Image (cartoon, rainbow, N blue to C red):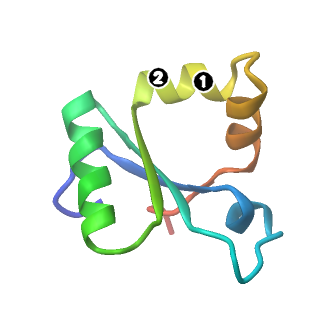
Amino acid sequence: VAGHPNTEVWLFGSFARGDWDAYSDVDLLAVGPSEPAAEALADALLSAHLGDDVLHLTHERWQQLRSSENPYWREIGADALRLDQP
């Protein structure tokens, strides 16, 4: 992501699953090499009004959570779409 090296932006929730409606919000996940980098990306996404809810995680934590036994994070990991790639 420009200005935020080694970071990723993921769309999750109803927009990623394709079952959104007029009341849905845009859920984004900002992933970075460190907690400060991920938080800075999340702040930039919120400031640009690109997401309604923006979570931030390190790369390592995102990989752990998306393959964990936690059903909340497994669902996010299964449905999430990476937005910062062609």
Three-letter amino acid code of the residue under disc 2: Arg
Pick the residue in front: 73 or 8. Answer: 73
**Residue assigned mark 1:** 65
Left or right of 29: which side holds 45?
left
Indicate whether 75 appears above or below 52: above
**Residue assigned mark 2:** 61
Residue pictured at 73% horizontal, 20% vertical: 70
Left or right of 81: which side holds 85?
left
Pick the residue in front: 44 or 82. Answer: 44
User: Quarter-wise, where is residue 14 in the image?
Assistant: bottom right
Three-letter amino acid code of the residue under disc 1: Leu
The image shows residue 46 at horizontal and vertical percentages of: 32, 64
Pick the residue in front: 62 or 84. Answer: 62
Q: Secondary structure at mark 1?
A: helix
Residue pictured at 67% horizontal, 71% vertical: 24
Q: Are marks 2 and 1 in contact (CB under 8 Å)?
A: yes
